[in-house]
Image (cartoon, rainbow, N blue to C red):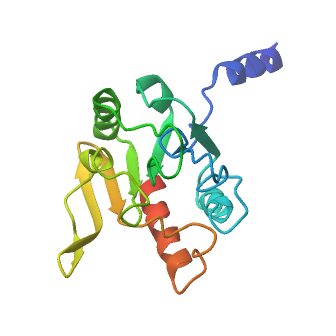
Amino acid sequence: MLRGFSILLLAFTPLAAQTVVALDGYHNNESKMPDHYQWDGTRPGGFSELAKLLRQNGADELRTLRNRIDTASLEGVKALIVVDPDTPAETVDPKYIEDSEIDAIAQWVSGGGRLVLLGNDKGNAEFEHLNRLAAEPVLVDHGINIMALTRYGKGLVFAAGDPWIYNEYIDHKDKRQIATKLFRLLLSK
Protein backbone atom coordinates (compact mmCIF):
# COMPACT_ATOMS: atom_id res chain seq x y z
CA MET A 1 0.00 0.00 0.00
CA LEU A 2 2.75 2.51 0.90
CA ARG A 3 4.66 1.67 -2.27
CA GLY A 4 1.66 2.61 -4.39
CA PHE A 5 1.31 5.83 -2.40
CA SER A 6 4.98 6.70 -3.11
CA ILE A 7 4.49 6.19 -6.83
CA LEU A 8 1.34 8.32 -6.74
CA LEU A 9 3.25 11.12 -4.95
CA LEU A 10 6.00 11.04 -7.59
CA ALA A 11 3.39 11.40 -10.32
CA PHE A 12 2.24 14.69 -8.79
CA THR A 13 5.67 16.06 -7.91
CA PRO A 14 6.48 18.99 -10.21
CA LEU A 15 9.49 18.49 -12.44
CA ALA A 16 12.39 20.93 -12.17
CA ALA A 17 11.97 23.85 -14.52
CA GLN A 18 13.78 23.51 -17.81
CA THR A 19 16.24 26.22 -18.81
CA VAL A 20 15.16 27.16 -22.33
CA VAL A 21 17.14 29.42 -24.66
CA ALA A 22 15.22 30.64 -27.69
CA LEU A 23 16.70 32.01 -30.88
CA ASP A 24 14.74 34.46 -33.00
CA GLY A 25 14.53 32.76 -36.38
CA TYR A 26 11.74 35.01 -37.61
CA HIS A 27 13.51 38.36 -37.89
CA ASN A 28 16.70 36.60 -38.97
CA ASN A 29 15.64 34.16 -41.64
CA GLU A 30 18.07 34.81 -44.45
CA SER A 31 16.91 33.09 -47.62
CA LYS A 32 20.38 33.40 -49.19
CA MET A 33 22.10 31.70 -46.21
CA PRO A 34 19.47 29.56 -44.43
CA ASP A 35 21.76 28.22 -41.66
CA HIS A 36 23.28 31.64 -40.87
CA TYR A 37 22.98 32.27 -37.10
CA GLN A 38 20.97 29.05 -36.62
CA TRP A 39 21.53 26.38 -33.93
CA ASP A 40 22.18 23.66 -36.50
CA GLY A 41 24.40 25.83 -38.70
CA THR A 42 27.82 24.15 -38.77
CA ARG A 43 29.34 26.45 -41.39
CA PRO A 44 31.35 29.51 -40.24
CA GLY A 45 28.20 31.68 -39.89
CA GLY A 46 26.25 29.14 -37.82
CA PHE A 47 25.58 28.89 -34.09
CA SER A 48 26.33 25.17 -33.57
CA GLU A 49 29.33 25.98 -31.34
CA LEU A 50 27.23 28.45 -29.33
CA ALA A 51 24.60 25.71 -28.97
CA LYS A 52 27.24 23.40 -27.46
CA LEU A 53 28.45 26.15 -25.13
CA LEU A 54 24.90 26.84 -23.94
CA ARG A 55 24.21 23.16 -23.25
CA GLN A 56 27.47 22.94 -21.27
CA ASN A 57 26.41 25.95 -19.20
CA GLY A 58 22.89 25.09 -18.15
CA ALA A 59 20.59 25.24 -21.18
CA ASP A 60 18.31 22.19 -21.18
CA GLU A 61 16.52 23.09 -24.40
CA LEU A 62 17.37 25.22 -27.43
CA ARG A 63 14.42 26.43 -29.44
CA THR A 64 13.97 28.57 -32.55
CA LEU A 65 11.04 30.99 -32.81
CA ARG A 66 9.76 30.98 -36.41
CA ASN A 67 6.80 33.36 -35.97
CA ARG A 68 6.30 36.86 -34.60
CA ILE A 69 7.29 37.02 -30.96
CA ASP A 70 4.39 37.12 -28.53
CA THR A 71 3.64 36.21 -24.93
CA ALA A 72 2.85 32.59 -25.81
CA SER A 73 6.12 32.04 -27.71
CA LEU A 74 8.10 33.34 -24.70
CA GLU A 75 6.37 31.10 -22.17
CA GLY A 76 8.95 28.99 -20.35
CA VAL A 77 11.90 30.73 -22.07
CA LYS A 78 14.77 31.86 -19.81
CA ALA A 79 16.83 33.67 -22.49
CA LEU A 80 15.95 35.04 -25.93
CA ILE A 81 18.63 35.81 -28.52
CA VAL A 82 17.68 38.31 -31.24
CA VAL A 83 20.51 38.42 -33.77
CA ASP A 84 21.14 40.37 -36.96
CA PRO A 85 17.58 41.18 -38.10
CA ASP A 86 17.26 40.83 -41.88
CA THR A 87 17.55 43.59 -44.42
CA PRO A 88 16.12 43.58 -47.98
CA ALA A 89 19.64 42.72 -49.22
CA GLU A 90 19.60 39.44 -47.24
CA THR A 91 16.08 38.17 -47.85
CA VAL A 92 13.19 38.89 -50.18
CA ASP A 93 10.71 39.59 -47.37
CA PRO A 94 12.46 40.91 -44.23
CA LYS A 95 10.36 40.84 -41.04
CA TYR A 96 10.72 43.91 -38.86
CA ILE A 97 10.23 43.92 -35.09
CA GLU A 98 6.76 45.34 -34.41
CA ASP A 99 5.39 47.31 -31.45
CA SER A 100 3.34 44.33 -30.22
CA GLU A 101 6.53 42.22 -30.14
CA ILE A 102 8.40 44.93 -28.24
CA ASP A 103 5.56 45.04 -25.70
CA ALA A 104 5.59 41.24 -25.25
CA ILE A 105 9.39 41.13 -24.92
CA ALA A 106 9.45 44.07 -22.47
CA GLN A 107 6.81 42.38 -20.29
CA TRP A 108 8.70 39.07 -20.45
CA VAL A 109 12.06 40.68 -19.51
CA SER A 110 10.43 42.67 -16.71
CA GLY A 111 9.15 39.37 -15.32
CA GLY A 112 12.66 37.87 -15.24
CA GLY A 113 13.56 37.03 -18.85
CA ARG A 114 17.04 37.52 -20.27
CA LEU A 115 17.24 39.30 -23.62
CA VAL A 116 20.40 39.11 -25.77
CA LEU A 117 20.56 41.54 -28.70
CA LEU A 118 23.33 41.01 -31.26
CA GLY A 119 23.56 43.54 -34.07
CA ASN A 120 25.95 43.50 -37.00
CA ASP A 121 27.82 45.86 -39.30
CA LYS A 122 25.90 48.72 -40.92
CA GLY A 123 24.14 47.38 -44.00
CA ASN A 124 24.17 43.81 -42.65
CA ALA A 125 21.46 44.24 -39.99
CA GLU A 126 18.23 46.18 -39.58
CA PHE A 127 18.74 48.67 -36.75
CA GLU A 128 15.73 50.99 -36.63
CA HIS A 129 13.42 48.38 -35.08
CA LEU A 130 16.10 46.38 -33.22
CA ASN A 131 17.36 49.47 -31.39
CA ARG A 132 13.91 50.03 -29.89
CA LEU A 133 14.66 46.97 -27.71
CA ALA A 134 18.21 48.06 -26.79
CA ALA A 135 19.60 49.02 -23.37
CA GLU A 136 21.80 51.98 -22.44
CA PRO A 137 25.48 51.45 -23.43
CA VAL A 138 28.09 50.45 -20.85
CA LEU A 139 31.03 50.14 -23.25
CA VAL A 140 31.61 52.88 -25.82
CA ASP A 141 34.67 53.25 -28.05
CA HIS A 142 35.20 56.57 -29.85
CA GLY A 143 31.48 57.36 -29.69
CA ILE A 144 30.42 53.91 -30.94
CA ASN A 145 28.25 51.78 -28.65
CA ILE A 146 29.95 48.39 -28.22
CA MET A 147 28.06 46.65 -25.38
CA ALA A 148 25.28 47.25 -22.91
CA LEU A 149 24.00 45.34 -19.89
CA THR A 150 21.11 46.56 -17.80
CA ARG A 151 18.43 45.32 -15.45
CA TYR A 152 14.85 45.78 -16.58
CA GLY A 153 12.38 44.86 -13.87
CA LYS A 154 13.43 41.38 -12.69
CA GLY A 155 15.23 40.62 -15.97
CA LEU A 156 18.38 41.54 -17.84
CA VAL A 157 19.14 42.94 -21.27
CA PHE A 158 22.54 42.43 -22.90
CA ALA A 159 23.30 44.09 -26.22
CA ALA A 160 26.39 43.97 -28.43
CA GLY A 161 27.03 45.65 -31.74
CA ASP A 162 28.16 42.41 -33.38
CA PRO A 163 27.11 38.72 -33.36
CA TRP A 164 30.65 37.82 -32.20
CA ILE A 165 29.85 34.32 -30.95
CA TYR A 166 29.15 32.46 -34.16
CA ASN A 167 31.23 29.49 -35.30
CA GLU A 168 33.83 31.44 -37.26
CA TYR A 169 34.86 33.66 -34.35
CA ILE A 170 33.86 31.93 -31.09
CA ASP A 171 37.37 30.49 -30.66
CA HIS A 172 39.12 33.73 -31.66
CA LYS A 173 41.09 35.25 -28.78
CA ASP A 174 39.02 35.03 -25.57
CA LYS A 175 35.50 35.06 -27.06
CA ARG A 176 34.54 31.55 -25.87
CA GLN A 177 35.57 32.46 -22.32
CA ILE A 178 33.61 35.73 -22.47
CA ALA A 179 30.55 33.98 -23.91
CA THR A 180 30.75 31.32 -21.19
CA LYS A 181 30.82 33.97 -18.45
CA LEU A 182 28.01 35.94 -20.11
CA PHE A 183 25.67 32.99 -20.46
CA ARG A 184 26.46 31.64 -16.99
CA LEU A 185 25.33 35.02 -15.71
CA LEU A 186 22.25 35.15 -17.93
CA LEU A 187 21.15 31.57 -17.24
CA SER A 188 21.73 31.68 -13.49
CA LYS A 189 18.65 31.62 -11.32
In the rendered structure, the answer to whether residue 76 lies left or right of residue 123 reads: right
Write the residue at 66% across / 49% down. 34
Quadrant of the rendered image containing residue 103: top left
Residue 65 location (% of width, % of height): 55, 36
As drawn, is 110 to the left or to the right of 9? left
59 versus 181 height, above or below:
above
* Farthest residue, direction bottom: 173
* Residue at x-position 31% and y-position 26%: 100
Closer-to-camera residue (121/114): 121
List x then y, in percent, for residue 60. 64, 47
Residue 48 horizontal/vertical position (percent): 68, 60
Question: In the rendered image of this protein, does residue 155 appear above or below residue 173?
Answer: above
Residue 86 position in % (x across, y down): 46, 48
Residue at 42% in and 26% down: 70
Relative depth, front residue between 178 and 134: 134
- Name the image quarter holding the N terminus: top right
Q: Is residue 168 above or below residue 48?
A: below
Position of 20 with respect to 42 (left or right) is left
Q: Residue at x 22, y 69 (%)?
A: 138
